[in-house]
Image (cartoon, rainbow, N blue to C red):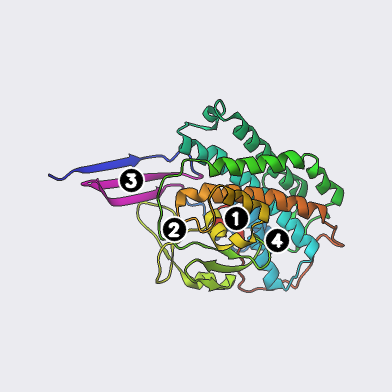
Amino acid sequence: MVDERVIKVDYLARVEGEGRVYVKLKNGKIEKVEVGIFEAPRFFEAFLRGRRYSEVPDITARICGICPIAYIMSSSRAFEKLFGIEVPEEIRTLRRIIYLGEWIESHVLHIAMLHAPDFLGYHSIIDMAKDFPEFVKDSLMVKAWGNKVIEVVGGRPVHPVSCRVGGFHKIIRRDQLLSLLKNIYEIRHAAKRILEFTLKLPIPDFKRDIEYVSLRGDKEYPILEGRVVSNKGLNIAEDELEKAIEVEQVPYSTALRYRIKGRGTYVVGPIARFNNNYDLLLPEVRETIEAHGYKAPLTNTYQSIIARAAEVYQAVLELEELILSYHEPKEPYIEGEIRAGWCAAITEAPRGIL
């Protein structure tokens, strides 16, 4: 007798975007899985054609309201390579500051509102609040602080307006950044508690042999630049990635799918960065993780929540240091020689290489 079952989830509620899942089981074994994205195409590639280069960062930022900095930084860096622009360290520091703010607000939203409720059997973060009030309060406070970092540097917390190719439209004053540190003691300890909370979650046993792809930092945890590496030997420059991957399309999804040529699927995001750059995490972060029995590599995809929380704590600690050492640049941006050509750059969006 053949036992067949079909599981259909027609709308995934706790994800960014719109998707569905279809699973077919036969005699207790999975026979077919389809993850379909039915969000309508938005044709950004088409309506960017013919635009002035200076418009591209602001237009591509509209792809995502939660991680606009990622699109701004990747497109800005690409044009800077083409135009021969080398931004000074002060501008690079400001970019890292605003980008880390985005990591914090995006990661905490994901941890507290999209991920943790499923681990603990709650319908939402609102339901969790009665049993885990400190975690919810910490999450809301740290996320708000991440948004504030973006607002101070970027002019507003969503779709910031100060960034441009070559730097920023105006100089961000040192006293503006120092204002962010008024409650840094509370933020720092709240971020650590969020990490400790995830380290105590009941993680299902689900280990898999996966290729994890991310940027690899030189002397610091990667966010703005680096080589593209994996735990299975991939090590290429950012402008070589397009040649290393292949794209496929399936009839049940509007989203394109990517594979490493000759190798197969791969995972990006916090768990990939964590595994490929564990030695570049700050000692305080590694000590907290290892005190709970974890360390790299994380081979269970459910443990991505731990990697994400580790990056929140890392970002808070690093931001404090960057803000205290910040010096205002002489000029808000650097001009270059505008010319036509092919250019590519990769940065680490909260959810992976972009």
Residue 350 horizontal/vertical position (percent): 59, 52
Q: Quadrant of the C terminus?
A: bottom right
Q: What span is colored magenta in the figure?
A: 16-40
Q: Which residue is mark 2?
A: 256
The answer to whether mark 2 and mark 4 are in CB contact below 8 A is: no
Q: Which residue is mark 4?
A: 54
Q: Main secondary structure of the magenta part?
A: strand
Residue 219 horizontal/vertical position (percent): 68, 66
Reply yes or no: does residue 88 show up in magenta.
no
Q: Amino acid at mark 1?
A: Ala
Q: Secondary structure at mark 4?
A: helix
Reply yes or no: does residue 35 show up in magenta.
yes
Report whether residue 44 is seen: no
Residue 349: numbered disc:
1
Front label number (3 vs 2)? 3
Q: Residues within 10 Å of mark 4 (few under 14, many from 20)?
A: some
- Residue found at x 65% / y 48%: 313
Mark 4 or 3 closer to N-term?
3
Q: Secondary structure at mark 3?
A: strand
- Give the Cα distance between marks 4 and 3: 42 Å
**Above or below — where is 183 with respect to 303?**
above
Q: Secondary structure at mark 1?
A: strand
Q: Residues within 10 Å of mark 3 (few under 14, many from 20)?
A: some
Residue 314 horizontal/vertical position (percent): 66, 52
